[in-house]
Image (spheres, helix red, strand yellow):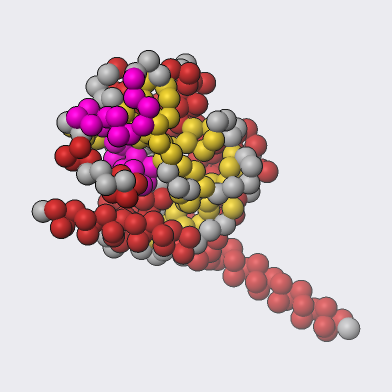
């Protein structure tokens, strides 16, 4: 019995030593990890929301984690393809675009809405004081999209308009890419565009509601004239080339954030989400196919 106990203790110690050695190996290779966020909001808002979560990640992982505030979606994609960005919060279409353009990534966590659902919508907003009641009323007006790699701000709206028989590049007088979801709302409020695409969960949460809470815009000043089919919620992804132990620790840190650092989680999600849940790349296959379809349409036009 003593021999069995000693053997068991030796085995446990060997496993612990092996885990510690692996951790030291990746810590030596990755003394700093870069976490980038897709720019749905302005840089200050992103920093305020994600700063505490990234600080907690640094403590939990035992290496410095730096928050990268990207200028556009493409910067995050290219940064991960080059290996300069180790972790990134994506939109579904940007993640699909990263995969189809050669980035070797693994989705590890997915947003979860307060009601437990894992999807959101693309909507078209107009100003409430405008005469427009449906998208067809806006022929010859200016359309505000977000970014070519945004699901709710470009891919899904373009696909929806295609099904409606609308070619946005000829139907509208001008198509303007605003760069972020916040900028799309601002452009609409200022009259630069007459209709703008954006993301919307439900009556209680959307980018516009976040802007309302920050007193950047009033939700009551806008009206939805179109809502898409459900879009799968956004992922957090890591480089596939990272050591398996490191990837597992990053995933555990993110999935446990709501429990281990509730205030940091509340800030990161604006208090409007449940804890992240595990996900893998297969969940985004429909978005990959959608992007390929839209790429095919563009090639036919040109």
Which quadrant of the rendered structure holds the N terminus? Answer: bottom right
Residue at x-position 15% and y-position 58%: 300
Vertical relation: 237 (above or below) 272: below
Q: Residue 182 is drawn in which quadrant?
A: top left
Please provide percent x and percent y for residue 29: 41, 59
Taking 93 as reference, is 11 left or right?
Answer: right
Taking 204 as reference, is 223 left or right?
Answer: left
Please provide percent x and percent y for residue 23: 53, 61
Spot the residue most to the right: 1
Residue at x-position 40% and y-position 19%: 128
Vertical relation: 155 (above or below) 247: above
Q: Residue 101 is drawn in which quadrant?
A: bottom left
- Residue 289 or 132: which is nearer the viewer? 132
Taking 51 as reference, is 152 left or right?
Answer: left
> Could one spot residue 81 in this view of the protein?
no
Residue at x-position 48% and y-position 51%: 232
Please provide percent x and percent y for residue 59: 57, 44
Q: Is residue 109 magenta?
A: no
> Could one spot residue 110 in this view of the protein?
yes
- Residue 11 or 157: which is nearer the viewer? 157
Please provide percent x and percent y for residue 70: 33, 39
What is the span of residues highlighted in magenta in the rendered image?
Answer: 131-157
- Residue 296 or 103: which is nearer the viewer? 296
């Amino acid at each position: 019995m003593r021999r069995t106990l000693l053997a068991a203790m030796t085995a446990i110690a060997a496993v612990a030593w092996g885990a510690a050695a692996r951790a030291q190996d990746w810590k030596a290779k990755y003394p700093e990890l870069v976490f980038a966020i897709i720019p749905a909001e302005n840089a200050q808002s992103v920093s305020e929301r994600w700063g505490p979560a990234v600080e907690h990640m640094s403590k939990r992982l035992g290496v410095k984690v730096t928050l990268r505030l990207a200028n556009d979606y493409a910067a995050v994609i290219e940064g991960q393809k080059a290996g300069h960005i180790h972790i990134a919060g994506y939109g579904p279409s940007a993640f699909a675009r990263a995969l189809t353009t050669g980035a070797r990534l693994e989705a590890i966590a997915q947003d979860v809405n307060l009601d437990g659902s894992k999807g959101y919508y693309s909507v078209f907003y107009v100003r409430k004081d405008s005469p427009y009641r449906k998208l067809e009323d806006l022929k010859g007006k200016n359309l505000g999209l977000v970014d070519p790699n945004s699901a709710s701000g470009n891919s899904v709206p373009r696909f929806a308009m295609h099904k409606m028989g609308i070619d946005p590049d000829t139907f509208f007088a001008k198509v303007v890419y605003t760069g972020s979801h916040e900028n799309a709302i601002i452009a609409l409020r200022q009259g630069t565009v007459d209709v703008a695409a954006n993301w919307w969960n439900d009556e209680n949460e959307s980018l516009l509601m976040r802007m309302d809470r920050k007193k950047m815009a009033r939700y009551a000043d806008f009206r939805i004239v179109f809502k898409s089919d459900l879009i799968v919620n956004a992922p957090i992804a890591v480089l596939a080339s990272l050591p398996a132990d490191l990837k597992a620790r990053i995933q555990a840190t993110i999935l446990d954030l709501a429990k281990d650092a509730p205030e940091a989680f509340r800030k990161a999600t604006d208090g409007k989400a449940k804890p992240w849940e595990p996900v893998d790349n297969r969940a985004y296959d429909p978005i990959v196919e959608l992007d390929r379809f839209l790429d095919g349409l563009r090639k036919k036009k040109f």
